[in-house]
Image (cartoon, rainbow, N blue to C red):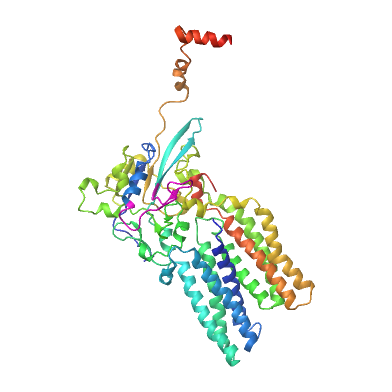
Amino acid sequence: MHPAPSIIFFTVFSGLGFGLLAWLGLGLPDVTGWVAFVFFALAYLMAVGGLISSTFHLGNPQRALRAFTQWRTSWLSREGWLAVLSLLVMAVYGAGLVFLGERWTGLGILGSILSLATVYATSMIYGQLKTVPRWNAWTTPALFMVFAVGGGALMAGQVTAAIILLILLGGLQYIAWTTGDARFRDAGHTMETATGLGPVGKVRLLESPHSGGNYLLREMVHVVGRKHARKLRILSLTGLSILPVLLLLLLPAGHIVGLIAVILHLAGTLGARWLFFAEAEHVVGLYYGKR
Amino acid sequence: MTLLPEKTDAKLGLVIDLDTCVGCHACVVSCKGWNTQGYGVPLSDQDPYGGDPSGTFLNRVHAYEVMRPDGQAQTTHFPKSCLHCEDAPCVTVCPTGASYKRQEDGIVLVNESACIGCGLCAWACPYGARELDQAAGVMKKCTLCVDRIYNDNLPEVDRVPSCVRTCPAGARHFGDLGDPDSDVSKLVEARGGIDLMPEQGTKPVNKYLPPRPKDQPLEEIDILAPLLEPVAEDARGFIGWLDKALEKL
């Protein structure tokens, strides 16, 4: 799949933003007044910034409101609802903390649940697609959720939780990569099943339907970026999990250490999310003799 | 509405004969010609006369070489357009309700004025049947020429999809695949019509008729080969002189 920057930024930053909101909703850290304002501003900046970024790849963003209508079948529509609901609930809860110094516990917990549900809905936009076998598995929602709560814990200054969750995240990312590598083959999709010519013999593309490119190839058959996938995996894993965990374990907790850990985690996450798209193979590539 | 109908009253679709298709691309051209001026926005091209042309098409013809177990290769031309699946994954993923499957005839359509151009339906389609028009930013797909097949202003012979009407080889057939007594259903039954990528569980309405086995085994082709050897061994006249002169050089 084409790793569009707008979609990478959207999933990474909205995931982090909603992850941070989930922690704030639970009162972790227990902040009020100006400190709370800074935390909430950061979370909203990332969550809303990510959502706005996602509209950049739309052909007709002026009709985006229509995306709220089909929540009964569409994960994309559900994500829209959950995002708006969690941002509204957390705005009321945050206003209580910032302006009144009051913690409305029930509202906070509701906001946390909604925030995590938003991340789950985002992950299912990809996880639901049978056409991309690498995504179509439990690892996709699991990974998005742990990215959100792990990165959120890091942002929220929850050191112990961050260490545990980032170790879990590293392991999960490794499992997602290794199991994902075999999933296309295991799903049984081949040029023979795609064309139905399997009973006749082995199929090879003789001639493409067009000499130039097209939307399908640009959007869904992204083969150029996989050359350095192995190196990128190692770099991403080091950034998103190993280095932040080592920093938090070995150095005394503080704002500078926390900031460096967040930056490293963010860089690793962006790399991993780029790979999430670039390595994903869509079955339509089979019709073009590509994967 | 993106909820799929429980059952459609008819299953209009195409039957494509891979044995008969000659790969002339006439269906591609007639499809683009009809659909760029009828239903919805035009099918735009980008850089059409430049160095890197591309454009929106609802129907494309691939060509495959199939290597048989006996070592003979066979060419198969392979037209591909929307299969109007019964369990269409492109419809249910749509966030706006722009994509829908019609209860009355099973045709899968896009309401372009509701399409935000997110592209998720194209991702959900295993067959590459949907293309986002780069000029209009809305999703385009085969409509089964819905503006022809019910059009009383056209002569009856033209009330079929443009690709079917155009095909010079008679490789494309249109009809109700939900009716077991229809011509297309009988054709599918007689020729062992198949689904594309059945493991995706989309239950396509369109069927493909597999190519018939070749009736000549490989060895017999060689009978004519000796006749293809050079025949003009002894050149005479001017050519003969030229041949000798060039030899001496």
Q: Tell me: A89 left or right of B83.
A: right
Q: Quadrant of residue A150?
A: bottom right
Residue B113 to residue A133: above or below: below
Which x, y percent locates residue A225? 60, 53
Horizontal side of B170 relative to A88 (left or right) equals left
Q: Position of residue B208 (x, y in %)?
A: 38, 44
Q: Which region of the structure is painted magenta?
A: B35-59
| Residue A61 in the image, given as x and y percentages of width and height | 44, 67
Q: Which image quarter: residue A256?
A: bottom right
Does residue B87 appear in the picture of this structure?
Answer: no
Q: Is residue A67 magenta?
A: no
| Residue B58 on the magenta segment | yes
State the residue at coordinates (49%, 75%).
A82
Q: How many marks?
A: 0
Magenta segment main secondary structure: loop
Residue found at x 49% / y 30%: B72
Depth check, front residue: B167 or B43: B43
Quadrant containing the C terminus of chain B is top right
On screen, residue A166 above or below B228:
below
Query: Residue drawn at (62%, 68%), measured in percent from left and top?
Result: A147
Residue B182 relative to residue B18: left or right: left
Q: Residue at x 65, y 72 (%)?
A: A151
